[in-house]
Amino acid sequence: MSLYTSAYLKQLSASTTFSVKTKLFTESRAHLTEFDIFLSHSFLDKEEVEGIYIELRNKGYSVYVDWIVDPHLDRKNVTKATAELIRKRMKSSKSLLFAISDKAEISKWMPWELGFIDGNTNQCSIFPVSQDKVAPKTFRRSEYLLLYPYVKMAEIDSKKEILITESGNEYSGLGDWVRRQVKPNYKIKNIDLL
């Protein structure tokens, strides 16, 4: 198992053709009013976030990213209407993935989004973006982030899967977690390290 790295996510974004990105982005804007995942992130991690978005969409999840789904929002002119639209999008999302990186600490919006969704759905998980290939045992969360499970990448039956670390050596598949299935469905012995 491993964490997602900045290099992997940037490569995924760079290797996805413009036409595929356009199709993914357009589908989100045109048809979606409810989302499986609200992706909370720092805009400074735009390349990595695009990679996360592509990874999740390729796995069949509907994902809200403000600058993809609502490109008309102006980060330099935040209004009450902006906050209300973000609230509406959070209310229409089943879960939140909190993309943390070195740059995420700068974001003023991310803690607000985490608190809002945690208070409404209690379906929040950390999506670490590592600068290096970090072994999951060395991933350190600080303070309130210790309350939440986090995402790992693993190979199961020769297929790359996104897992939510519930506790110890028990994991849930992302889809089961989004659908709120409580029991972890993987044990560490069934998972091949990437």
Image (cartoon, grey):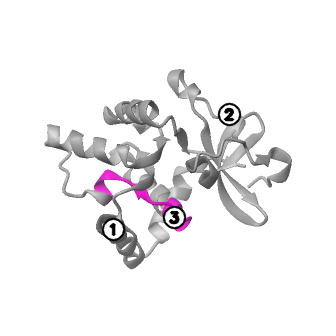
In the image, residue 14 sits, relative to residue 38, either above or below, namely below
In magenta segment, residue 173: no
Sequence-first disc among 3 and 2: 3
- Between 158 and 90, the one nearer to me in the picture: 90
Secondary structure of the residue carrying tag 3 is helix
In magenta segment, residue 62: yes
**Residue 41: horizontal and vertical position, in percent?**
40, 43
Secondary structure of the residue carrying tag 2 is helix
Secondary structure of the residue carrying tag 1 is helix
Quarter of the image with the C terminus in it: bottom right
In the image, residue 84 sits, relative to residue 35, either above or below, namely above
> Label 3 amino acid?
Leu
Q: CA distance from mark 3 to mark 1?
A: 24 Å
> Label 1 amino acid?
His
Look at mark 2 in the image and give the residue it sits on: 138
Q: Which mark is residue 12?
A: 3
Label 2, residues with CA under 10 Å away: few <14, some 14-19, many ≥20: few
- Name the image quarter holding residue 44: top left
Mark 3 or 1, closer to the camera: 1
Name the residue rendered at 42%, 55% in the picture.
Answer: 35
Look at mark 1 in the image and give the residue it sits on: 31
Name the residue rendered at 37%, 36% in the picture.
Answer: 113
Label 1, residues with CA under 10 Å away: few <14, some 14-19, many ≥20: few
**Residue 112: horizontal and vertical position, in percent?**
35, 31
Name the residue rendered at 77%, 66% in the picture.
Answer: 158
> Label 2 amino acid?
Thr
- Between 32 and 103, the one nearer to me in the picture: 32
Q: CA distance from mark 3 to mark 2?
A: 24 Å
Task: Answer yes or no: is residue 78 visible.
Answer: no
Q: Give the magenta range.
A: 55-68
